[in-house]
């Protein structure tokens, strides 16, 4: 150790460029360090995450169970890297700038994922709440509301691209110079969640922080944007009153309060709070995810209290020059310009396009692959079958990039068109129903997911190991959708049927079966 600087004598370099200096902090699965980008001569934050080494997998080496778990860990890693790139593309002032990411293999064989980010200078919201004196001089309503509005603006932006934070809490929010709020730890939340739905093959775990967890998170159900709104409701309640809505009590754990108890009104602890804000918090804390407002609606409701309205009556808001000042943090949806007068796509060009897309996907560059397919699709309208092939391919690419809200309708349309000419058991028909069902499930839409998933299960024959695994996974998701739709008896029946399939494939004492037993027990309570 160099006593003059407090830095290691031989600091670690990541990819020969990013120097890892002193520890900033650590969480459940990560450590954050002061760092330095030696190429661009600037300070950075270095976040290091580590997955289990192959030798620590809770299964016999080379067993089907171990292979399944290792495959799941690999999917988690790839999805983490893809979604980190997605957050890097948001360009929202409320998210830290992401500079670089990758993975290294440590000496014990375990993979370590690293993330290079903007070094923020400020304090966490957790520290600000702890410093505040809510009894003698509570923070102003405007202070609380403006912080929550900025978080809602960030969530609005990330929910548009199918990212769910899963762990909104004061420790994951930072106040920086200029009064900006930064929402942190998207990467950690995504890595731990690895999808909106619990996975059949993953070790049982609940993502989130108990005081801020939605009822559906407590039950291990599908996690959607509504879960983030619930967590933000808990946080806004705390910002206004100094107290989270629920505390563990004698004879009633915190989880039970989230599931059963009516949250106390903000007005009981903060008499000067506007009634509209108290009503908004109550709506955000609704037990039913469908009853909660969207993050954008939360932003809109809070904005008048965070800044004075300045919209002239009967004005054209799209050209109002005050708009960037009144709504500076709510980025508009990204619109893609459709080209006109483009040359038709030939069969040869289509074949080359699909080859190029496969190369991009093999190199984990889905954004470029999506752009190529969108361009090709616009040029293929003259040939219905070519357009159908490209729509199917684009849907698959979007799905694997985690853009479920864009993928689902493409599979819907492609599956409908395939079924006009092909039997229900055709691989193209089944592929569309499988991915449409899973995409809608990831979005938390059981009414749309269930018909597709049941169609797939009824028509897939399970003749290969891969198809058998997809049937098991689809039936598990069907159970999740039944639970989400408030049909617990059907959910339990489906989970018990899946248990028989898992026991036949992996053995009744396997991790998969033990995992599922926990899900069954949780749903039965």
Image (cartoon, helix red, strand yellow):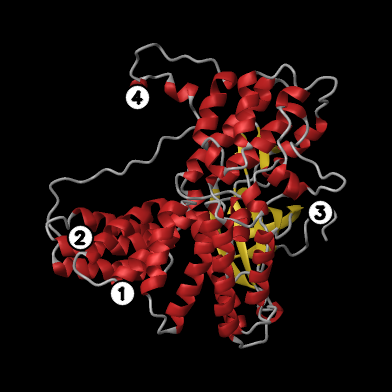
* x and y percentages locating residue 59 in the rendered image: 68, 82
- Closest to the observer: 117 or 383? 383
User: In terms of secondary structure, where does tag 3 sit?
Assistant: loop
Q: Is residue 91 left or right of residue 392?
A: right
Query: Are discs 2 and 1 less than 8 Å apart at CB?
Result: no
Separation (CA) of disc 1 from disc 3: 61 Å
The answer to which of marks 4 and 1 sits earlier in the sequence is: 4
- Give the crowd class for mark 2: few <14, some 14-19, many >=20 residues within 10 Å: many
Mark 1: which secondary structure? helix
Q: Quadrant of residue 219?
A: bottom right
Q: How far is the residue under mark 4 from the one under mark 2?
A: 34 Å
Tag shown at residue 318:
4
Q: Name the element at disc 4.
A: helix
| Mark 1 or mark 3: whose residue is earlier in sequence | 3
Is 256 on the left-hand or right-hand side of 223? Answer: right
Distance in Å between CA atoms under marks 2 and 1:
18 Å
Q: Is label 1 in contact with label 3 (beta carbons under 8 Å)?
A: no
Which one is earlier in the sequence, the residue at label 2 or at label 1? 2
| Circles 4, 3 touching at the beta carbon (< 8 Å) | no
Q: Locate residue 75, reporting x and y percent.
A: 53, 69
Q: What's the mark number on residue 6?
A: 3
> Which residue is farthest bottom?
62
Assess disc 4: are there few (<14), some (14-19) or many (≥20) residues with their C-alpha within 10 Å of its C-alpha: few
Q: Please tell me which of labels 4 and 2 falls first in the chain.
A: 4
The answer to whether one can see residue 326 in this image is yes
Circle 2: element type: helix
Q: Nearer the viewer, mark 4 or mark 1?
A: 1
Q: Mark 4 or mark 3, which is nearer to you?
A: 4
Residue receiving disc 1: 427
Residue at x 61% of width, y 69% of height: 202
Q: Residues within 10 Å of mark 1 (few under 14, many from 20)?
A: few
Residue under label 2: 387
């Amino acid at each position: 150790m160099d006593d003059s600087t407090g830095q290691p004598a031989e600091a670690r370099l990541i990819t020969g460029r990013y120097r890892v200096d002193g520890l900033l902090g650590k969480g459940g699965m990560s450590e954050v360090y002061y760092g330095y980008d030696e190429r661009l001569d600037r300070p950075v934050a270095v976040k290091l995450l580590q997955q289990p080494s192959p030798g620590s997998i809770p299964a016999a080496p080379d067993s089907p169970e171990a292979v399944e778990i290792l495959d799941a860990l690999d999917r988690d890693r790839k999805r983490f890297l893809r979604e980190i790139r997605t957050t890097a593309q948001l360009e929202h002032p409320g998210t830290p700038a992401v500079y670089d990411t990758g993975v290294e293999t440590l000496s014990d064989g375990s993979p370590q994922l690293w993330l290079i980010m903007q070094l923020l200078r400020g304090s966490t919201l957790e520290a600000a709440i702890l410093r505040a004196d809510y009894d003698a001089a509570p923070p102003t309503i405007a202070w609380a509301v403006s912080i929550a509005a900025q978080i809602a603006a960030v969530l609005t932006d990330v929910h548009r691209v199918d990212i769910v934070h899963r762990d909104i809490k004061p420790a994951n929010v930072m106040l920086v110079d200029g009064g900006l709020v930064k929402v942190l730890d998207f990467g950690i939340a995504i890595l731990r969640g690895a999808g909106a739905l619990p996975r059949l093959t993953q070790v049982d775990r609940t993502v989130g922080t108990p005081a801020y967890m939605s009822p559906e998170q407590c039950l291990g159900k599908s996690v959607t944007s509504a879960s983030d709104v619930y967590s933000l409701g808990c946080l806004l309640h705390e910002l206004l009153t100094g107290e989270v809505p629920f505390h563990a009590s004698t004879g009633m754990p915190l989880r039970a309060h989230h599931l059963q108890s009516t949250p106390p009104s903000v007005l009981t602890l903060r008499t000067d709070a506007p009634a509209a804000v108290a009503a908004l918090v109550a709506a955000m804390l609704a037990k039913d995810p469908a009853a909660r407002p969207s993050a954008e609606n939360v932003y809109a409701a809070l904005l008048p209290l965070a800044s004075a309205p300045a919209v002239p009556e009967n004005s054209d808001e799209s050209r109002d020059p005050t708009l960037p000042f009144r709504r500076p943090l709510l980025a508009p949806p990204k619109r893609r310009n459709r080209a006109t007068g483009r040359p038709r796509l030939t069969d040869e060009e289509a074949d080359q396009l699909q080859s190029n897309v496969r190369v991009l996907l093999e190199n984990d560059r889905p954004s470029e692959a999506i752009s190529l397919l969108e361009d090709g699709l616009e040029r293929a309208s003259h040939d219905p079958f070519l357009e159908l092939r490209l729509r199917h391919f684009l849907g698959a690419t979007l799905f694997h990039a985690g853009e479920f809200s864009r993928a689902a309708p493409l599979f819907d349309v492609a599956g409908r068109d395939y079924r006009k000419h092909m039997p229900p058991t055709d691989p193209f028909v089944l592929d569309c129903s499988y991915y449409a069902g899973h995409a809608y499930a990831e979005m938390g839409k059981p009414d749309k997911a269930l018909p597709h998933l049941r169609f797939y299960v009824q028509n897939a024959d399970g003749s290969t190991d891969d198809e058998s695994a997809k049937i098991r996974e689809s039936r598990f998701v069907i159970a999740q959708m039944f639970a989400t739709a408030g049909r617990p008896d059907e959910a339990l029946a489906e989970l018990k049927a899946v248990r028989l399939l898992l026991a036949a494939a992996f053995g009744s004492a396997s991790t998969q079966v033990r995992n599922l037993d926990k899900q069954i027990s949780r749903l039965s309570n």
